[in-house]
Amino acid sequence: MKRVLHMKFLKSDGKKVTIQIDDIKEDVLEKDVNDLMDYILSKDLFTFKGASLSKKEAAEIVNISEEEISLT
């Protein structure tokens, strides 16, 4: 099963943005995610169409299972 982290932020222009990290480890803790999001905000690492990230909105780990389909 594939695990994906979605980190949702509010931008300085009032719009929301999601940063996705694929294939995260099994032992990721809530504290790890909070610390990462705080680090991203404190270092102003990303801008989107000229708008900086200003606030944490939400985070979630999504489990994705894949099922191969046989083509005939």
Image (cartoon, grey):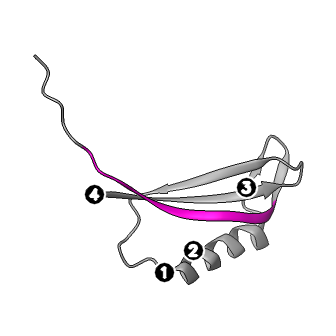
Q: Is residue 5 left or right of residue 16?
A: left
Q: Position of residue 22 (x, y in %)?
A: 44, 55
Residue annotated with mark 2: 33
Label 4, residues with CA under 10 Å away: few <14, some 14-19, many ≥20: few
Q: Amino acid at mark 1?
A: Leu
Does label 1 or label 4 sit earlier along the sequence? 4
Q: Do the CB atoms of the residues marked 1 and 2 lie less than 8 Å apart?
A: yes
User: Which callout, 3 or 1, points to the residue nearer the camera?
Assistant: 1
Does label 3 or label 4 sit earlier along the sequence? 4
Where is residue 31, by image quadrant?
bottom right
User: Which callout, 3 or 4, points to the residue nearer the camera?
Assistant: 4
Residue annotated with mark 3: 46
Spatial CA distance of label 1 from label 2 is 7 Å
Spatial CA distance of label 3 from label 1 is 23 Å
Q: Secondary structure at mark 1?
A: loop
Where is residue 71, by image quadrant?
top left
Q: Do the CB atoms of the residues marked 3 and 4 lie less than 8 Å apart?
A: no
Q: Is residue 57 magenta?
A: yes
Spatial CA distance of label 2 from label 3 is 17 Å
Residue annotated with mark 1: 29
Spatial CA distance of label 4 from label 2 is 20 Å
Residue annotated with mark 4: 1
Q: Do the CB atoms of the residues marked 1 and 4 lie less than 8 Å apart?
A: no
